[in-house]
Structure formats: C-alpha cells, structure tokens
Amino acid sequence: MNVFGVDIGGSGIKGAPVDLERGALTEERYKVLTPQPSTPRDVAASVAEVVAHFGWTGPIGVTFPGVVTGSTVRTAANVDPSWIDTDAGALISGAVGGLPVTVLNDADAAGVAEMTFGAGRGRTGTVILLTLGTGIGSAVFTEGRLVPNTELGHLELKGHDAEKRASSKAREDEELSWEHWATKRLRKYLAHVEMLFSPELFILGGGVSRKADKFLPYLDGLRTEIVPAELRNDAGIVGAAMAASTRRTRPERTVRA
C-alpha cells in the first residue's frame, strides 16, 4: 500500500509516495525550499506544490518541526512563530483540496520509521533518535513505544539551547571542522542526554547521517551504542506516511503513528 509523506523542515520541504510494506519511497522525492518567512499560509502552499508534483489524491502525512498535539502546533523554534496554536492539519488540508492530512512531530515520524524499518528495528530498552539538521529533533522509545514530542534539542548546553551549539546548522554556520563539532559539541550533548536517560542506543539521523563516517569516529567515551539512521533523510517522509495510514485505520492514534 502506498501513502504520501511530506517532511517540513526549517530549510526544505520534501515529499514522496511511500510503500508501507517496505518502508521505502516509490518515486524520487521532490523538494522545495522552505519559504522565508515560513508563515503557515506560505508553508502550506509549498506543501501543496510538493503534493501536486505527484498528482496525489489520497491521504497525506505531514511532519512539523515542533510539538504537535492533535493537529495543532504548540511550538515553532525553527519556523515562523505564527505557527503556534495553528491547526496545521486543517490548514494544510485546505491547501491540498480537502485531502485528509495527519500532522505529527518531525523527529517522532523519523523515529517511528527507523524503529520499524531501519536502525532501531527489533531493538528493546530505551532508544533515542536524534535528527541533526537546522535544529535537533528527538524521538524517545521505551520497549518500542514512542514518548511523543520530547524536543530534547532544547535541553540547555553551556547556557544555550543544545541545538544552537550541536546541530548540523551550528557546525556549518560556525565553520567548525567535523572533529571539533563532534568532540566539543555533539559528544558533550550526547553525554548529557545519556546521563538523563541511560539509553541502549542512539540513532543519529537528519541529512548529516549520510556523512556519518566523518564524525562517528570522534564520538568515543560514551556507554551508549551510536549508529547512523538507515533511512537517512527519508525517515521523516516514511514516518509521515505511516501516520497517515494509521489515522485511516485507527483514528484515535493519529499523532502517535
């Protein structure tokens, strides 16, 4: 069965149809830049552009970079603050011609996909996926069950939100070497999360996961096993499609996927 997934990020919006039996995109994803300013109306129009590119007419799952309860946005750290308290599901559904839309936190979507089809498949205990991109998203699982909307990128690190120091964007903006970023920023952040949660596994996702060989060797000294996301930057799209499928069959679990 194919369902459509869209992943809204601070810098880009991408989507594609997903084969839910394999957890894989059935066509090459289509991506547009996140509009600036990233207001609800403009972002919804960009989502509609992605959907229209494929001529999609069925259910759609959409990720959002912030806390989502029901289909309402509660936080918006890396997009325009006018998103807060917006019913994203209703807004985007209107933009795509009334198609059914399910909205969930972006890292939660990626985590559900990785736990089902990727690096977390079959793993028990506490597993934490961290998406390293414009910010840092998180998905926390205990015995395979998602704890939604954890937003661990906003833990304090050196007096700042952790994502302001340890995200992929921070590395690029400050022109840090992979070694410096990994040893002085990312490893310290992971050690803090490890101290709080004592996970069995860290899965590192987001676009930077495709370059894991450049920084994973520097993340030594931690007790927790660390692996790159297997679905890489497609995980959000896959997880969004999974959420849309779940809504259709079990409406009470729309956000949890």
Image (tube, rainbow, N blue to C red):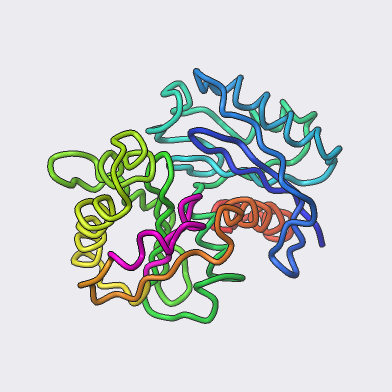
Q: What residue lies at 52% left-to-right and 38% top-to-bottom?
A: 9
Vertical side of 115 occupied by 78: above or below: above
Q: Is residue 36 left or right of residue 216?
A: right
Residue 192: quadrant of the picture? bottom left
Q: What residue lies at 50% left-to-right and 61% top-to-bottom?
A: 111
Quarter of the figure that contains the C terminus: bottom right
Furthest residue toward left: 159
Residue 180: x and y in percent read 24, 51
Q: What residue lies at 85% left-to-right and 40% top-to-bottom?
A: 57
Q: Is residue 244 left or right of residue 155?
A: right
Residue 69: x and y in percent read 48, 44
Residue 226: x and y in percent read 37, 71
Residue 70: quadrant of the picture? top right
Q: Is the magenta region chiefly helix, strand or loop?
A: helix
Quarter of the figure that contains the N terminus: bottom right
Residue 105: x and y in percent read 50, 47
- 91 in the magenta segment: no
Front one among 64 and 93: 64
Vertical side of 21 occupied by 210: above or below: above
Numbered range of the magenta stretch: 202-218
Q: What residue lies at 61% left-to-right and 36% top-to-bottom?
A: 13
